[in-house]
Image: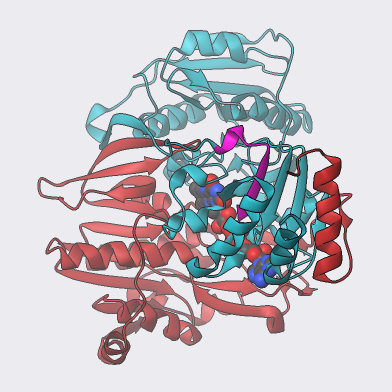
Amino acid sequence: MSDVLAVADHRRGELRDVSYEIITAGRQLADETGGDLHLAVISGTVDDFAEKLNREGVDAIHTVSHGEEFNHDVYTQAITQLYDELAPQFVLTPNSVNGLDYAPAVAKALDLPVVTDTVGLETDGDTLVATREMYGGKVETTNELSGEAVATIRGAEWPAAEGTGDASVEAFDADIDEDAVGSTVTGFEEVGGGDVDISEADVLVSVGRGIEEEDNLPLIEELADALDATISSSRPIVDNGWLPKNRQVGQSGKVVTPDVYIAIGISGAVQHVAGMKGSDTIVAINTDPNAPIMDIADYAIHDDLFDVVPALTEEFQ
Amino acid sequence: MKILVTVKEVATVEDEFEIEGTAIADQYLGADLNEWDDYAIEEAVQLQEDGIADEVVTVTIGPEDCEQTIRQALAKGADRAVRIWDDSLEGVDLLDVNAKTEILSAVIEEEDPDLVLTGVQAGDDSFGATGVSVAEHLGYQWGAVVNHLEHDLDDGVASVRRELEGGVEELTDVELPAVLTIQTGINEPRYASLRGIRQAQRKPLDVQGLDDLGVDDSAVDSDLELTDMYEPESESDVTVWEGGAEETAAELGDLLRDKGVAP
Ligand SMILES: Cc1cc2nc3c(=O)[nH]c(=O)nc-3n(C[C@H](O)[C@H](O)[C@H](O)COP(=O)(O)OP(=O)(O)OC[C@H]3O[C@@H](n4cnc5c(N)ncnc54)[C@H](O)[C@@H]3O)c2cc1C
């Protein structure tokens, strides 16, 4: 019997979607050997969170009331103590930015192996078989870890748990050593504001690293003009300072759902796809027929953007 | 203040490739300085130029082949480099997080830096876990996914911004010594100048084995075994438009008209 301890994610008073998805992932994994699913909710309004998370499949919810916002030292201490108390075989955390700020520390503190960004998990009770990508999604791999392990799960891979559950909710009295807390959150800031809101656009002409140089951007601008569309981009274009932050689509940028999303020279990394997969129709222009973007595209042109984009602009001039 | 930057040479894959066993066949692989590490190096060099750091040391786990990548970091301004390699690392498919942690921690203990900068992740295996794991192992403080660092580390505190999801940044103070995992976009990595490249040839590059570091061979026995690699099954029902650019552009034009979004 392999019990699972899963950890919920929340920020500024709101549970994040992955908190419900991790219930599904944890339930599936626990079911393979008839184990229990424990869910940990740490910091913030834990009782309110526990009520929301009490969905089908959770056996027990453990609340740790300590502070308002995420702090990796508090999380690491609380989870290692819960681990000692509950002795689960697997610890699951979201592969969120905060998940990556504590999961490796939890693994190290407990002297366990860690596998991150998993998209599939199985076990026979002894071994954890984790599926994950490498090389920006070009290949998938399976990885075996024997014994106990920590795994982080990719968001939006498992469906959200639904229904109303009958989990026991227990306050866990974690002994947090304040002296060991070496970092302090002093605030939050929203970035990427400004005059353009790409999430409002009907048609997005989105440009990626395939454009090669800033000097080539007018090609995209001309197309957007001809189509009366809005320009957005993948991250490297913003990192390079070629477009402002408010144009970035993806995990750390904006989530967009236009009628048509034209991805030009964008490979389709998971963090990019997180921001545009809800688009009505996705068109990819990419020289690489194996680029991960092809998995979610409705239409594709496997050709050089420097040929296709001017031809398309011409169509509408 | 001394800064240590972990630098990895990552494998890059050509558009068309084949898999042999649990790896991509050699002839389809290239090598490059890890994108995230490039930003970490730049941040360290800028801290030095701002008079905050006195020394920037890079550390790399890798065979002799990757010295070119290490020289790149030196050409950009790092002072010296440490490269770790050992026969026992030869032929290891995938070095897991714990193995990397053991090795890097041994170097960090020896070097005793005030600040360690790593990339958020390596572009090839994308674990994104080594920096935080090292910090916990050594009792350093840490911050993951840092996209801004205040260049004022006076009172033993690093004021950083952590890039969270959805355009939100967290402002955090981290006590030193600390490990920060650096996100792309934190700065604009420079290109190495010709002078930098020449100087890099003369900068010290010290090679050490696991014995030299006092790391047991067993530390590299991976907890994680790569058992299969395959091209993901495509669930897509993508329509691929064939033909020359004029033809494919016309198809896309028709689609936009059909959808009623063409001007
Ligand atoms: C914590 C974290 C957060 C992140 N957040 C985001 C985010 O919010 N948004 C985001 O986009 N990324 C994000 N990333 C980065 C992401 O992992 C990828 O690195 C990035 O999306 C890659 O951008 P790209 O597709 O433009 O570039 P690449 O992956 O380099 O792809 C370029 C593509 O262009 C194609 N190409 C090249 N030349 C041509 C040509 N002449 N004609 C046609 N096609 C061509 C290539 O085949 C390739 O597919 C994040 C990463 C991390 C770790």
Say whether residue A172 is left or right of residue A281: left
Where's residue B43, x and y in %? 29, 61
What colour scheme does the image use? by chain
Q: Quadrant of residue B25?
A: bottom right
Q: Quadrant of residue B221?
A: bottom right
> Measuring 61% from the left and 30% from the top, which residue is drawn there?
A18
Give the quarter of the figure containing the N terminus of chain B: bottom left
> Measuring 31% from the left and 77% from the top, which residue is drawn there?
B76
Question: Which colour is chain B painted?
Answer: red
Question: Which colour is chain A painted?
Answer: cyan
Give the quarter of the figure containing the C terminus of chain B: top right
Q: Is residue B224 visible?
A: no
Say whether residue A163 is left or right of residue B254: left
Q: Nearer the viewer, residue A278 or A292?
A: A278
Residue A170 versus residue A220 in the image, above or below: above
Say whether residue A110 is left or right of residue A225: left
Where's residue B70, x and y in %? 39, 80
- Residue segment shown in magenta: A198-207
